[in-house]
Amino acid sequence: MIRSITNVGRPYYTNTFRGPTAEFRVRILSLDLEKRITVAIDGPAGAGKSTLARRIAAKLGYLYIDTGAMYRAVALWAERLHVSVSDMHRLEQLAAQAEISFVPGENTVLLNGEDVTHAIRTRAMGQAASQVAAVPGVRRAMVNSQREMGRRSSVVMEGRDIGTVVFPEADIKIFLDADLDERTERRARELDLPAQAVSAEIQERDHRDRTRAEAPLVQAPDALYVDTTGLSIDAVEQELLRLIRERTSNGKERTH
Ligand code: DC
């Protein structure tokens, strides 16, 4: 079972259908009217998704969900249990059993209660995550969990298939991209390695993520394409916030 720490507990309506009082009914009605906003950000590795999604979520007061971290966590667990990335059946079982959660307001990722924030950030886990993410059963488990998180609160969710598969009805979809050279430079800086050390890996991962049969990385037809090549994070952040606010009543949860 997978859940977000922020979402632990019963949904607000759990009690209410067992003969709600009038007061309860009013409360249910007002909660139902609250619109939860979903911002979907997709794109290839190194396009700036994580940094931007995290900043935007903080500005808007939404929950930030890094779905790549979830695939990385499954890959890490598989590695620890010596489960091969080609053992689809076992991987599917692990994904269904994994308890992956995010600590709101922090970058912390928990796998079965253990802080794996740093352990999942290695090059090896990036590659393994991309392989694990091609397994349909793994994706099913992750997507279910991601949808559950998005149903319960306003989110900025980033990954590869958020606007196409996880939330095709997202309020706003952004496809972030950048030149391969720049993406390679950014990833190399993150990992503190020379660019040539990560270049082949990035290309291999992009190719796998874009060409897999299940939920490949592709721009949703209604997503806004944003090329971040040569732009500062601050400039892109301002532009994205403007776009989001324009489409979501100034970023506030609207009622209708
Ligand atoms: O964003 P990232 O580099 O942490 O993602 C690691 C891998 O996980 C990426 O190569 C592809 C996969 N992934 C995916 O298939 N779908 C997502 N929504 C997010 C990540």
Image: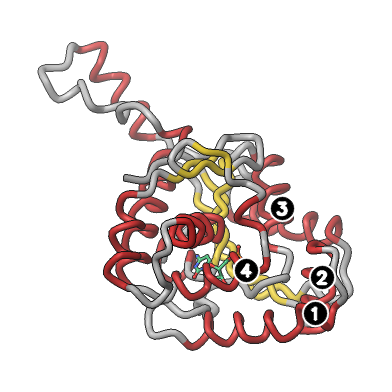
**Mark in front: 4 vs 2:** 4
User: Disc 1 or 4, which lies upstream in sequence?
Assistant: 4
Residue hosting label 2: 188
Asked which quadrant contains residue 9, the reply is: top left
Q: Earlier in the sequence, mark 2 or mark 1?
A: 2
Circle 4 is placed at which residue position? Answer: 124
> What's the residue at 80%, 62% (across, down)?
190
Mark toward the start of the polypeptide (3 vs 1): 1
Determine whether the residue tagged by mark 2 lies in a helix, strand or loop.
Answer: helix
* Separation (CA) of disc 3 from disc 2: 27 Å
Label 1: few (<14), some (14–19) or many (≥20) C-alpha neighbours in 10 Å: few
Q: Secondary structure at mark 4?
A: helix
Quarter of image, ligand 1: bottom right
Cα separation, mark 1 vs mark 4, equals: 13 Å
| Local crowd size for mark 4, using a 10 Å CA cut-off: few (<14), some (14–19), many (≥20) | few
- Disc number at residue 241? 3
